[in-house]
Image (spheres, rainbow, N blue to C red):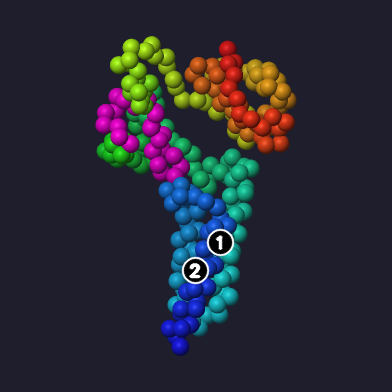
Amino acid sequence: MEALTMFIRTVFIYIIIFTLLRLMGKREVAQLSTFDLVVAIMMAEVSVITIEDDEMPFYLGVVPLVTLFMLQIIASRISIKNKKFRAVVEGKPTILIDKGRIDENALKSVRININDLISQLRRKDVHNLKEVDYAILEPSGDLSVIKKVDKRTVNKEDLNIKLSYDGLPIPIIMDGEVEYEHLDKLNLSEKWLYGELEKKGLKSPGEVFYASLDSQGHLYVSPREKSPDNSNWFFDST
C-alpha cells in the first residue's frame, strides 16, 4: 500500500513540476539566473519531501510548489520592466578582456583566475590571447568571445583586405530608457539622439526597445512592437 501511495504521489508531482516548468518559460540550464536556480533547487527539495512523507497531506506539498512558481513569474515580470531589479536578480555582463587587454580587477570581481579564463577561451577554440578583442562573462556564466577583425572565421589579412576597427556596439537605449552614461562616454548629447530618432519617425526613446551605436557610427534601432514601424533598421549617424 505504501509503495502504491508513493507511486501515485510521484506521478502527480511529476505532472505538476512538468507543467510549472513549462509555464515558467523556455530557458536552457546554462541560462538560468541565480534566482531561477534557487527556485529549481527548492522545488526539487519540496517534491522529494512531498513524495516520501505519506503522513503529510498531498495538498500541503503542492502549496509551496505553486508559491515558488508564482514568485518566479512575479520576479520575471518585474525584471522585464525594472533594470535595477534585473541587475540584482540576473546580474550584469562583465568584460574580462577589453580591446585585447585583460582586466585584472574584473577577474577578481567575478572570482576567476587567469587559468580559468584561459581554459574557457580554449573551449571557445581560442588558443592565443592575442586573438581576442573582447571576452565577456555573461550573467549565465557563459563566456562570449569576440575575436579581433583579422582573426575571425575568414582571415582577412591573408586576403589582402583593408581592415577597419570593429569594436563592441554600445547600447544607447534599452527598454525605452536612455543610457546617459554611454552617451557621455561617446560625447553625444540627448539632442543628437532625439534628432536621429526623428529621422525614423520616432518621437521619443520610449518608443524604442533597443538601440546601439557601433564603432563605424551606425545606429541600430529596434522599435517597440506598438510602434507604427515594427521593423529593424540600420542607418549612419555620421
Q: Which residue is mark 2?
A: 14
Q: Which residue is mark 1?
A: 20
Residue 164 drawn at (x, y percent): 42, 14
> Is residue 65 at least partly visible in the picture?
yes
Which badge, 1 or 2, comes first in the chain's sequence? 2
Answer whether residue 143 is magenta in the image.
yes
At label 2, the amino acid type is Tyr
Answer whether residue 43 is magenta in the image.
no
User: Which numbered disc covers residue 209?
Assistant: none
Q: Looking at the image, which residue sits at the far bottom? A: 1
At label 1, the amino acid type is Leu
Q: Determine the CA span between mark 1 and mark 2.
A: 10 Å
Residue at 49% x, 19% y is 215
Q: Nearer the viewer, residue 78 or 168?
A: 168
Residue 30 drawn at (x, y percent): 42, 48
Q: What's drawn in magenta, residue-wise?
A: 124-146
Residue at 38% x, 32% y is 145
In which quarter of the view is residue 206 placed?
top right
Quick check: 17 above or below 133? below
Q: Quadrant of the C terminus?
A: top right
Residue 44 drawn at (x, y percent): 46, 65
Q: What element does badge 1 sit on?
A: helix
